[in-house]
Image (cartoon, helix red, strand yellow):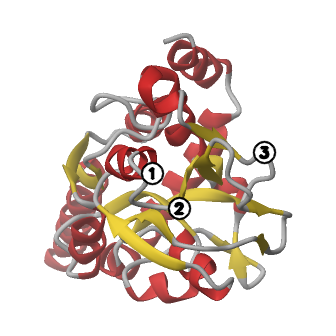
Protein backbone atom coordinates (compact mmCIF):
# COMPACT_ATOMS: atom_id res chain seq x y z
CA UNK A 1 0.00 0.00 0.00
CA UNK A 2 1.42 3.40 -1.00
CA UNK A 3 2.43 6.00 1.57
CA UNK A 4 -0.13 8.42 0.11
CA UNK A 5 -2.96 5.88 0.52
CA UNK A 6 -1.87 5.16 4.08
CA UNK A 7 -1.86 8.90 4.83
CA UNK A 8 -5.36 9.34 3.39
CA UNK A 9 -6.69 6.42 5.47
CA UNK A 10 -5.05 7.79 8.61
CA UNK A 11 -6.58 11.24 8.05
CA UNK A 12 -10.01 9.66 7.49
CA UNK A 13 -9.71 7.68 10.72
CA UNK A 14 -8.77 10.78 12.69
CA UNK A 15 -11.66 12.72 11.18
CA UNK A 16 -14.07 9.93 12.08
CA UNK A 17 -12.82 9.85 15.67
CA UNK A 18 -13.11 13.63 15.95
CA UNK A 19 -16.66 13.71 14.61
CA UNK A 20 -17.75 10.85 16.83
CA UNK A 21 -16.21 12.54 19.85
CA UNK A 22 -17.86 15.89 19.08
CA UNK A 23 -21.26 14.26 18.68
CA UNK A 24 -20.85 12.20 21.84
CA UNK A 25 -19.73 15.11 24.03
CA UNK A 26 -21.83 16.10 27.03
CA UNK A 27 -24.00 19.17 26.53
CA UNK A 28 -24.40 21.81 29.25
CA UNK A 29 -27.89 23.28 29.16
CA UNK A 30 -28.94 26.15 31.45
CA UNK A 31 -32.36 26.81 32.88
CA UNK A 32 -33.90 29.04 35.51
CA UNK A 33 -33.50 28.14 39.18
CA UNK A 34 -37.22 28.62 39.85
CA UNK A 35 -40.00 26.09 39.33
CA UNK A 36 -42.28 26.53 36.32
CA UNK A 37 -44.70 23.66 36.73
CA UNK A 38 -44.99 21.21 35.00
CA UNK A 39 -42.09 22.05 32.70
CA UNK A 40 -39.55 22.61 35.47
CA UNK A 41 -40.29 21.20 38.90
CA UNK A 42 -37.91 20.49 41.77
CA UNK A 43 -34.92 20.25 39.39
CA UNK A 44 -36.87 17.88 37.15
CA UNK A 45 -39.97 18.45 35.04
CA UNK A 46 -41.43 17.63 31.63
CA UNK A 47 -38.96 19.87 29.75
CA UNK A 48 -35.97 18.41 31.60
CA UNK A 49 -37.01 14.85 30.80
CA UNK A 50 -37.82 15.74 27.18
CA UNK A 51 -34.40 17.28 26.61
CA UNK A 52 -32.57 14.42 28.31
CA UNK A 53 -34.56 11.85 26.30
CA UNK A 54 -33.70 13.63 23.04
CA UNK A 55 -30.04 13.76 24.05
CA UNK A 56 -29.97 10.09 25.00
CA UNK A 57 -31.51 9.10 21.66
CA UNK A 58 -28.71 11.00 19.91
CA UNK A 59 -26.00 9.50 22.12
CA UNK A 60 -25.45 12.56 24.33
CA UNK A 61 -25.29 13.14 28.03
CA UNK A 62 -27.08 16.35 29.03
CA UNK A 63 -26.04 18.31 32.12
CA UNK A 64 -28.72 20.73 33.35
CA UNK A 65 -27.39 23.75 35.27
CA UNK A 66 -29.67 26.05 37.27
CA UNK A 67 -29.24 29.82 37.64
CA UNK A 68 -31.26 33.08 37.53
CA UNK A 69 -32.81 33.69 34.12
CA UNK A 70 -30.73 36.75 33.27
CA UNK A 71 -27.56 34.78 34.03
CA UNK A 72 -28.84 31.97 31.79
CA UNK A 73 -29.10 34.44 28.90
CA UNK A 74 -25.72 36.01 29.66
CA UNK A 75 -24.06 32.57 29.88
CA UNK A 76 -25.55 31.60 26.53
CA UNK A 77 -24.39 34.84 24.93
CA UNK A 78 -20.85 34.28 26.22
CA UNK A 79 -20.89 30.60 25.09
CA UNK A 80 -20.41 29.42 28.68
CA UNK A 81 -23.29 26.97 28.16
CA UNK A 82 -24.35 25.09 25.03
CA UNK A 83 -28.03 25.93 25.34
CA UNK A 84 -30.85 27.20 27.52
CA UNK A 85 -34.54 26.60 28.02
CA UNK A 86 -37.36 27.46 28.01
CA UNK A 87 -37.26 30.63 25.89
CA UNK A 88 -40.09 32.19 23.94
CA UNK A 89 -39.11 33.85 20.67
CA UNK A 90 -37.96 37.46 20.76
CA UNK A 91 -36.07 39.13 17.91
CA UNK A 92 -33.58 40.74 20.28
CA UNK A 93 -32.84 37.42 21.99
CA UNK A 94 -31.18 36.21 18.80
CA UNK A 95 -28.06 38.08 19.90
CA UNK A 96 -27.84 35.58 22.79
CA UNK A 97 -28.28 32.39 20.75
CA UNK A 98 -30.29 30.64 18.06
CA UNK A 99 -33.81 29.25 17.75
CA UNK A 100 -35.09 26.55 15.39
CA UNK A 101 -36.12 28.47 12.29
CA UNK A 102 -38.19 27.78 9.17
CA UNK A 103 -39.29 30.11 6.39
CA UNK A 104 -37.78 33.14 8.07
CA UNK A 105 -39.38 32.70 11.47
CA UNK A 106 -39.23 30.46 14.54
CA UNK A 107 -40.41 26.91 13.91
CA UNK A 108 -43.18 26.06 16.38
CA UNK A 109 -43.02 22.38 15.40
CA UNK A 110 -39.69 22.22 17.29
CA UNK A 111 -40.99 23.77 20.51
CA UNK A 112 -40.56 22.24 23.94
CA UNK A 113 -44.08 23.23 24.96
CA UNK A 114 -46.80 25.82 24.38
CA UNK A 115 -47.22 28.35 27.15
CA UNK A 116 -49.20 31.34 28.24
CA UNK A 117 -49.11 34.29 30.62
CA UNK A 118 -52.09 35.33 32.72
CA UNK A 119 -53.03 38.39 34.75
CA UNK A 120 -53.61 37.96 38.48
CA UNK A 121 -55.43 40.63 40.47
CA UNK A 122 -56.84 41.07 44.00
CA UNK A 123 -60.37 39.75 44.41
CA UNK A 124 -62.80 42.62 43.85
CA UNK A 125 -60.40 44.53 41.57
CA UNK A 126 -61.91 46.18 38.48
CA UNK A 127 -58.65 45.81 36.54
CA UNK A 128 -59.07 43.44 33.61
CA UNK A 129 -57.72 42.42 30.18
CA UNK A 130 -59.87 41.98 27.08
CA UNK A 131 -57.29 40.20 24.91
CA UNK A 132 -55.97 43.43 23.42
CA UNK A 133 -55.84 46.09 26.12
CA UNK A 134 -56.02 46.60 29.87
CA UNK A 135 -59.24 47.96 31.38
CA UNK A 136 -59.02 50.24 34.43
CA UNK A 137 -55.24 49.96 34.50
CA UNK A 138 -53.81 51.53 37.65
CA UNK A 139 -50.88 50.90 39.97
CA UNK A 140 -47.77 48.80 39.44
CA UNK A 141 -47.89 45.41 37.75
CA UNK A 142 -45.46 42.74 38.88
CA UNK A 143 -43.63 40.43 36.48
CA UNK A 144 -40.72 37.97 36.82
CA UNK A 145 -37.37 39.62 36.16
CA UNK A 146 -36.13 39.35 32.57
CA UNK A 147 -39.22 37.56 31.23
CA UNK A 148 -40.40 38.24 27.68
CA UNK A 149 -43.85 39.46 28.79
CA UNK A 150 -42.38 42.67 30.23
CA UNK A 151 -41.99 44.42 26.87
CA UNK A 152 -45.62 43.68 26.01
CA UNK A 153 -46.86 44.97 29.38
CA UNK A 154 -44.95 48.23 28.98
CA UNK A 155 -46.19 48.62 25.40
CA UNK A 156 -49.74 48.34 26.73
CA UNK A 157 -49.14 51.10 29.25
CA UNK A 158 -48.30 49.15 32.42
CA UNK A 159 -45.74 50.32 34.97
CA UNK A 160 -43.82 47.12 35.69
CA UNK A 161 -42.11 46.06 38.90
CA UNK A 162 -39.72 43.12 38.39
CA UNK A 163 -38.75 40.52 41.00
CA UNK A 164 -36.72 37.32 40.88
CA UNK A 165 -39.51 34.97 41.99
CA UNK A 166 -43.18 34.79 41.07
CA UNK A 167 -44.09 33.76 44.62
CA UNK A 168 -42.58 37.06 45.86
CA UNK A 169 -44.77 38.99 43.44
CA UNK A 170 -47.89 37.10 44.50
CA UNK A 171 -47.19 37.88 48.15
CA UNK A 172 -46.74 41.56 47.28
CA UNK A 173 -50.05 41.45 45.41
CA UNK A 174 -51.85 39.87 48.36
CA UNK A 175 -50.36 42.50 50.69
CA UNK A 176 -51.51 45.40 48.53
CA UNK A 177 -48.04 46.40 47.34
CA UNK A 178 -48.90 45.63 43.70
CA UNK A 179 -52.10 46.18 41.72
CA UNK A 180 -51.61 43.05 39.58
CA UNK A 181 -49.13 40.37 38.54
CA UNK A 182 -48.40 38.95 35.09
CA UNK A 183 -47.09 35.39 35.43
CA UNK A 184 -46.68 32.20 33.45
CA UNK A 185 -50.09 30.57 33.81
CA UNK A 186 -49.04 27.13 35.15
CA UNK A 187 -46.70 28.83 37.60
CA UNK A 188 -49.27 31.33 38.87
CA UNK A 189 -52.02 28.73 39.09
CA UNK A 190 -49.84 26.33 41.05
CA UNK A 191 -48.84 29.02 43.55
CA UNK A 192 -52.50 29.71 44.27
CA UNK A 193 -53.28 25.99 44.45
CA UNK A 194 -50.55 25.43 47.04
CA UNK A 195 -51.07 28.61 49.08
CA UNK A 196 -54.58 28.95 50.47
CA UNK A 197 -53.80 32.33 52.05
CA UNK A 198 -52.88 33.76 48.65
CA UNK A 199 -55.79 32.07 46.85
CA UNK A 200 -58.19 33.70 49.33
CA UNK A 201 -57.08 37.15 48.14
CA UNK A 202 -56.11 36.69 44.48
CA UNK A 203 -58.01 35.73 41.34
CA UNK A 204 -56.94 35.10 37.73
CA UNK A 205 -58.33 36.93 34.70
CA UNK A 206 -59.41 34.11 32.39
CA UNK A 207 -58.40 35.75 29.09
CA UNK A 208 -54.69 34.98 28.62
CA UNK A 209 -52.29 37.89 28.22
CA UNK A 210 -50.41 35.98 25.53
CA UNK A 211 -49.97 32.42 24.27
CA UNK A 212 -46.77 31.29 22.53
CA UNK A 213 -44.31 28.41 22.07
CA UNK A 214 -41.19 27.92 24.18
CA UNK A 215 -37.90 26.57 22.86
CA UNK A 216 -34.52 25.10 23.64
CA UNK A 217 -32.05 27.70 22.32
CA UNK A 218 -28.45 26.90 21.42
CA UNK A 219 -25.38 29.13 21.64
CA UNK A 220 -23.85 30.84 18.62
CA UNK A 221 -20.74 28.73 19.18
CA UNK A 222 -22.85 25.58 18.76
CA UNK A 223 -24.55 27.05 15.70
CA UNK A 224 -21.21 27.91 14.10
CA UNK A 225 -19.42 24.65 14.89
CA UNK A 226 -22.08 21.95 15.33
CA UNK A 227 -24.99 23.07 13.16
CA UNK A 228 -25.89 19.50 12.18
CA UNK A 229 -26.04 18.48 15.81
CA UNK A 230 -28.44 21.20 16.91
CA UNK A 231 -30.70 20.55 13.93
CA UNK A 232 -30.75 16.87 14.86
CA UNK A 233 -31.48 17.77 18.49
CA UNK A 234 -34.46 19.97 17.60
CA UNK A 235 -35.77 17.26 15.27
CA UNK A 236 -35.45 14.69 18.07
CA UNK A 237 -37.34 16.99 20.47
CA UNK A 238 -40.22 17.12 17.98
CA UNK A 239 -40.14 13.33 17.66
CA UNK A 240 -40.05 12.62 21.41
CA UNK A 241 -42.74 15.20 22.20
CA UNK A 242 -45.13 13.37 19.86
CA UNK A 243 -44.42 9.97 21.46
CA UNK A 244 -46.23 7.89 24.08
CA UNK A 245 -43.08 8.18 26.18
CA UNK A 246 -43.56 11.94 26.49
CA UNK A 247 -47.28 11.61 27.19
CA UNK A 248 -46.39 9.43 30.18
CA UNK A 249 -43.82 12.00 31.33
CA UNK A 250 -46.31 14.86 31.06
CA UNK A 251 -49.11 12.93 32.76
CA UNK A 252 -46.76 12.00 35.62
CA UNK A 253 -46.14 15.65 36.49
CA UNK A 254 -49.73 16.75 36.01
CA UNK A 255 -50.78 14.10 38.54
CA UNK A 256 -48.60 15.72 41.26
Which quarter of the rendered picture does the N terminus lie within? bottom left
Given this view, does label 1 or label 3 mark the residue nearer the observer? Answer: 1
In the image, is residue 249 above or below residue 125? Answer: above
Place residue 90 in its image quadrant: bottom right
Question: Where does the image place residue 3, in percent across and percent down from the top left?
Answer: 13, 76
Q: Residues within 10 Å of mark 3 (few under 14, many from 20)?
A: few
How many tags in the picture? Answer: 3
Query: Left or right: 247 with respect to 201?
Result: right
Q: Residues within 10 Å of mark 2 (few under 14, many from 20)?
A: many
Residue at the spot of label 1: 173
Place residue 147 in its image quadrant: bottom left
Identify the residue at horizontal 73%, vertical 48% (top origin): 205
In the image, is residue 150 above or below residue 228? Answer: below
Q: Spatial distance from mark 1 to mark 2, Cα to Cα?
A: 6 Å
Q: Sequence-wise, which precedes: disc 1 or disc 3?
A: 1
Query: Residue 23's mark?
Result: none
Query: Residue 179's mark?
Result: 2
Residue at the spot of label 3: 206
Q: Describe the element under mark 3 as helix, strand or loop.
A: loop
Question: Where does the image place residue 130, in percent across and percent down from the top left?
Answer: 86, 63
Identify the residue at horizontal 64%, vertical 87% (top origin): 155
Camera-side residue of 137 and 229: 137
Asked if labels 2 and 1 touch by Cβ distance under 8 angstroms, the answer is yes
Amino acid sequence: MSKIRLLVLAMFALTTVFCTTSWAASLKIATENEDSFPWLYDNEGADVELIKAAGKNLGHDVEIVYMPWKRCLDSLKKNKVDGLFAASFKEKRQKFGVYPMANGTHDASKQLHPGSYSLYVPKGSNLSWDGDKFINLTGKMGAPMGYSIIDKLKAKGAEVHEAKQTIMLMKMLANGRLASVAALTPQGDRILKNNADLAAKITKIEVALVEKPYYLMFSHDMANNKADLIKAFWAEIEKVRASDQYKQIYDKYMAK
